[in-house]
Amino acid sequence: MITMEKPSASLWRKIKPRYNLSGNICKNCSTAYFPPRIVCRKCGRNSKMESMTFSGNGEIISFTEIRVPPDTFRDEAPYTVGVVKLDEGPLVEGHILENGIKIDIGTKVKAAFRKMYVDGEEGPIYYHYKFEPV
Amino acid sequence: MSRDVAIIGVGLAKFGERWNAGLKELMAEAGLQALEDANLKSDDVEMLYGGTMASGRFMGQEHVAALMSDQLGFKNIPAVRIENACASGGSALRQGYISVASDIHDIVVVGGVEKMTDVTSSEATTALGGAGDQEWELFQGITFPALYAMMAKRHMYEYGTTEEQLAAVSVKNHENAMKNKYAQFHKRLTIDEVMKSKMVSDPLKLLDCSPISDGAAAVVLAPLEIARKYNDTPIKIVASAQASDTLRLAERDNLTSIKATSIAAEKAYKQAGVTPKDINVAEVHDCFTIAEIMAMEDLGFYKKGEAGKAVMNGETAINSKISINTSGGLKGCGHPVGATGVKQAVEAVWQLRGDAGERQVNGAEVALTHNVGGSGATAVVHIYKRAN
């Protein structure tokens, strides 16, 4: 019943934040957001949002290794994901790469540009930021 | 001014893998039982709210409230589907409550249904993933077990909660389900069996996770002033509260509690004029074992970090300090997502009427139900008492 549900327009719409860690900041209250928001959670209608690119540096708040993936990630499992607190403030979910450094809560990470998954044999290759322990 | 609202009839379709029952059969099974319980004719019903999360994804069937009304033989009444992820049932109940309380309708049926076992488990995982932020969670392959696993890992880090304490939730709920003929599982578990079950998303194992289920539930609501016309023991809804939060887990204030639950609970206790200590029996949203532990804390039954120990000490078993998830909860009774919130109300009614059989909580006076959507973006809390 369920078919592939990654309409390509929905991917392209988010390419800038996904590839460049481009978020925004509310000039009214100085809260930074990644991914970007249209409306500041604190200021609501009084939001003054401006673009902001994030350094990609942060630390792991929590993480887990996924052994039972959704359909689209069938060929990727097991993989590790985490919640990372970026140095600029916001918390964000992302994949955590293995590079030989043992990860734990508090481990420092840096964002890298990586392949996420391939949509079947003929579908597009999806790219995304992922976090790498440093 | 609003009117007092009572539940005058309840019904359940057995939860589980119901190969020979589709949406229609499940809804009819629960709905007819509720009508019979309330001693109602189909023509008496004025409005229907139907909770379902993903019937379109699971069955290709949308427009489920009209279908429910159609299948139950209701004649051209207004019927509205409520979708609020795993809190669809609780949210539908709240809408039914509001329509009776506000004097718009007298007799309202609230149904909840989900038929989940016709798809593969990875398709189900994808469908349920839609309860989170599609663009930033599901797109990255972050499943629901993974979101709750990250809450669990942080809870263990901050409060010293252990995997054995998580397992104890599952063991207790399976024990309760043994006494519930509507439950999906009738299988006792040991902590060791939970600990040794297949890892899904560490630290959550297969037996920490609620199952994929088929099922339906229904309740009939009426203004309290006429409730006794239909039923000798109407159960009064003394509070109905709901709150929301960010869809995305990482954007919340913290990972170790569900803020929408605390907010809804605080409002509910105020409406009902009771405190957490007054609750005798609670059906809480244990989609994963960690979720029951967070619920116990966020609902004010235990201080932050104390719930895991309490479960381990048996304080939440039937007829102990507070009886939690007497039905078996989502873990033992099953979790057909749209049905769950309504099923919780059915269990509360049985407990308060003294009709819960082997799992009856002695002297149950005040019951609470707690239904969560997604990783905590919606929480619905209801409190019930026997009508005097």
Image (cartoon, coloured by chain):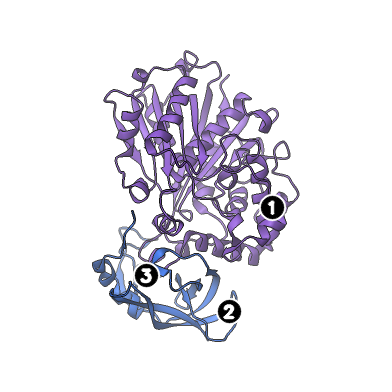
Chain colours: A blue, B purple
- Residue B284 showing in the rendered view: no
Mark 1 and mark 2: span between their CA atoms?
Answer: 28 Å
Depicted B318 relative to depicted A125: above or below: above
Vertical side of A60 occupied by B7: above or below: above
Give the label on residue B168, or none. 1
Counting from the top left corner in percent of width and height, residue B125 is at 44, 58
Residue A94 in the image: state x and y as whole percent.
45, 73
Q: Determine the residue positioned at 54% across, 49% down.
A: B262
Mark 3 to mark 2 CA distance (whole Å): 24 Å
Residue drawn at point x = 40 percent, y = 64 percent: A71
Horizontally, residue B99 falls left or right of residue B358, namely left
Which of labels 1 and 2 is toward the front?
Answer: 1
Q: Mark 1–mark 2 contact, CB under 8 Å?
A: no
Q: Can see residue B90?
A: yes
Q: Chain of mark 1?
A: B
Element type where label 3 sits in the image: loop
Q: How many marks?
A: 3
Would residue B152 be found to the left or right of residue B375 on screen?
A: right
- Say what amino acid the circle numbered 1 marks: Ala
Q: Which mark is residue A103?
A: 2
**Element at badge 2?**
loop
Q: Subunit of mark 2?
A: A
Residue, far right:
B313
What chain does mark 3 sit on? Answer: A
Q: Amino acid at mark 2?
A: Ile
Q: Secondary structure at mark 1?
A: helix
The furthest residue to the front:
B20
Mark nearer the viewer, 3 or 1 = 1
Q: Which mark is residue A35?
A: 3
Q: Amino acid at mark 3?
A: Pro
The vertical placement of B157 against B61, above or below, is below
